[in-house]
Image: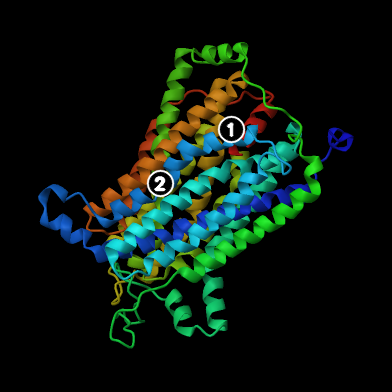
Amino acid sequence: MSEKVEKQEKLNYKRTFLIGFGFMGCMLLWSVYNSYVPVILRGKLSQLGIAELAGSHAWLAWLSVPLIVNAIMTIDNVFGVVFQPHFGKRSDRTRSKLGKRMPYILICLPICALFFTFVPVAATVRAAGLSILLMMAVIICFNFVMSIWRSPVVSLMPDFTPSELQSDANAVINIMGGIGQMVGFVVGTIASTLCGLLGFKVLSANLKAGTNELGEVLDANGNVVLNAAGEPTYVNYTPVFVVAAVIAVLCLVVLYFFYKKNKQYDLSANVGFESETGEEKKEKIKIKNLPITKEEKRSLFIMLGSLFLINNATEAIVPNFTNFANDTLKVSPIYSTLMMAVFAVSLAVFGIPAGRMGRKIGRKKTIMIGLGVIVAMFAVYLVVSQILPANTDGSVNKFTWIILWVALVVGGAAVGCININTLPLVLAIGGREYVGTFTGYYYTATMSASVTGPILCGLVIGLFKEDYNFMFLFCAAFFALGLLAITGVKHGEVAKGEDTAWLDEAVQNADD
């Protein structure tokens, strides 16, 4: 191993920044996928007549388009739980001229990008049933291939960074992931502009237009736009997905040439895989009987329950927001993704202040403040949107718009207060010795909610006649339940003057 690596005292920011291009491409694809796929699926399922089917059979009264869409949108979370750990471990054992991780990324990212572009292409098939079958095949393939290379791309940073510098490196990686997410939020605008410049005026205009629940393009008066044959016009989102896929592949190109030039700095390159010893297995068995008090165990169980409730709410927002904006606000998915960017920016900007609040007034209090604020904002929006009359075109009035924008900005900061402090609180209950175990508990609670949250929210929206405003009712209720639960947590704070360096490092590593 290079002496230069062993003697490194400062983080090489340029190198870490270039490593982050892989994670940037990953987050870019997810950003576009979560924003546009729900809209496409909703249109196709509505064309198929799901609502009519449910209405004609009493035993299917619970079935709705939002429920099915949200269930499909949990596939990535299920695959993440099932496949990501497996391929992460396989990459640990891989040996090649391109190191442990790059073979997975080089092969799977382009395949993933290809499947990604086929999603809107499958949606262009006229027969709704066949179109949905093709889309499902592509979506499943995309999610599976993504689960192969996602863990390896996240593991690149630790491979190139000594453990004492990984906290700083993780901050850089998260910034790159945030950039990828932001690019995903504006890629629709980029695609629409490119279509206009290339002469595809109708395609560009359609991307900017609003649609009804069938995915038909609407004009400024809310009327369905017809083509030359007198048939409804549908939005073709292929340019958005193609632009996103091209940018993701360019990220891979940057990462490949970086690795080729800097593979001598890969700290894991010459580290052999060793099977687990009997002592290590024995230690894992001992961990099951954690040496914490009954009161601490009670706090742990209550905190995990609270996390499950909170994440049911947060995970429900993403797959429903574009359809909410299209139905209630009468804006296109391109515009709604810009609104989501405002929420994301607010969350990111308030990350550092939220951490400071947690240290100054306590993690539990900071989380409770965040929960209280977001419950209040969502409840106010829901009440205002239901009381004040809508505009003649069915969109919300100006005052409701103002409340919504305030809710996005303030809500992003509130979620920051929650997200930044929940994992440290859980880890602090377990202590330095059991970081891995308690990190596992944390992700069990949050990943379980990532599956149940969208499905339950879709069920609620369907019960309220597909009124996406009731997404806010669902989220407010689960945030409120999480707030109520967390009042029973009595542990997880760090005493004044206590060394928290281990905790900060554990949190950063868990975020990886």
Residue at numbered disc 1: 89
Of residue 376 and residue 238, the one placed in the foreground of this image is 238
Residue farthest to the front, as pictured: 96
Please, is residue 294 above or below residue 306 in the view? above
The percent position of residue 449, horizontal first and vertical second, equals: 40, 39
x 29%, y 70%: residue = 390
Residue 39: image tag: none
Residue at numbered disc 2: 75
Other-residue count near label 1 (Cα within 10 Å), few / some / many at <14 / 14–19 / ≥20: few
Q: Amino acid at mark 1?
A: Lys
In the rendered structure, which disc, 2 or 1, sits on the residue that comes first in sequence? 2
Query: Would you identify the image quadrant in which residue 478 lies?
Result: top left
Q: Amino acid at mark 2?
A: Ile
Q: For numbered disc 2, what is the local secondary structure?
A: helix
Q: For numbered disc 1, what is the local secondary structure?
A: helix
**Horizontal arrangement in the rendering, residue 506 relative to residue 333 (left or right):** right
Query: Would you identify the image quadrant in which residue 246 lies?
Result: bottom right
The percent position of residue 223, horizontal first and vertical second, equals: 29, 81
x 59%, y 24%: residue = 435
The percent position of residue 168, horizontal first and vertical second, equals: 72, 41
Q: Are marks 2 and 1 in contact (CB under 8 Å)?
A: no
x 50%, y 68%: residue = 240
Of residue 159 and residue 274, the one placed in the foreground of this image is 274
Other-residue count near label 2 (Cα within 10 Å), few / some / many at <14 / 14–19 / ≥20: some
Quarter of the N terminus within the rendering: top right
Please, is residue 221 above or below residue 247 in the view? below
Of residue 200 and residue 148, the one placed in the foreground of this image is 148
